[in-house]
Image (cartoon, grey):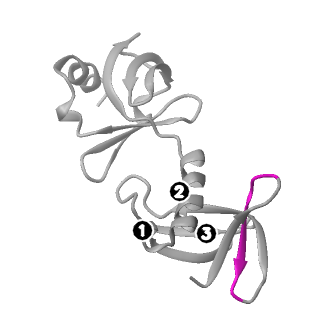
Amino acid sequence: MSFQLSRNGAGRLVFTAADGSREEGVVPVRAFPVSAPDVGFALVAADGRELVWIERLDELPETLRALVGAELASREFMPVIRRICSVSSFATPSTWEVETDRGTTHFVLRGEEDIRRMAGDTLLIADSHGIQFLIHHPLKLDRGSRKLLDRFL
């Protein structure tokens, strides 16, 4: 690789280019986080400049892959909804109780426009705090979950 990554004392990523120049506060960004999460990454400087393009994480040496993967995991929090337990009202705003891959939670859906269809039969639901939830293959949800979801689509 023509660059190195490390963490500084504050835990922020430091990018070192082949010419020895350094950038602190580097952030990895996925090009297509929902439709193609394993392909296309950029390391971006604090001022928004792209420093390097990475086609696939598995092309990186293990140490770099671990650093980028850990940073992505800490920045990207998108629980996957596995079941919709209840909805407080079919009018919005409404409070949803859902089971996700990270446990059971409640969130407030402000409006139907906060449910977006994405590529590959995926829904993206944004709650009132900006947390985004995914539903992969909504037709594979249990019957009760599909019935509740259909009222908002």
Nearest to viewer (mark 3 / mark 1): 1
Residue 63: x and y in percent read 57, 65
Residue that badge 3 annotates = 43
Q: Which region is colored magenta?
A: 10-18
Sequence-first tag of 2 and 1: 1
Q: Is residue 9 above or below residue 107?
A: below
Question: With respect to residue 11, does 13 lie above or below?
Answer: below
In the picture, the disc for residue 58 is 1
Above or below, 139 relative to 57 = above
Q: In the shown orientation, is residue 66 left or right of residue 46?
A: left
- As rendered, which of 105 and 14 lies closer to the eye? 14
User: In the structure shown, which secondary structural element does the residue marked by tag 2 occupy?
Assistant: helix
Mark 3 surroundings: few (<14), some (14-19) or many (≥20) residues within 10 A: many
- Mark 1 or mark 3, which is nearer the start of the sequence? 3
- The quarter of the image holding the N terminus is bottom right
Q: Element under label 1?
A: helix
Point 55% across, 69% down: residue:
42
Farthest residue to the front: give it. 62
Does the segment drawn in magenta span residue 37?
no
Mark 3 → mark 1, Cα distance in angstroms: 15 Å
Nearest to the observer: residue 54 or residue 96:
54
Reading the image, the residue beneath label 2 is 69
- Specify the farthest residue to the bottom: 19
Inter-mark Cα distance, 2 to 1 = 10 Å
Q: What's the residue type where badge 1 is placed? A: Asp
Left or right, residue 132 beside residue 98: right
Q: Residue at x 33, y 14 (%)?
A: 85
Q: Dividing the picture into quarters, in which one does residue 35 lie?
A: bottom left
- Quadrant in which the C terminus is drawn: top left
**Dot 2 surroundings within 10 Å: few (below 14), some, or many (20 or more)?**
some
Count neighbours of disc 1 (C-alpha within 10 A) and say few if under 14, some if 14 to 19, many if 20 or more: few
Instruction: Check disc 3 and give the amino acid type.
Output: Leu
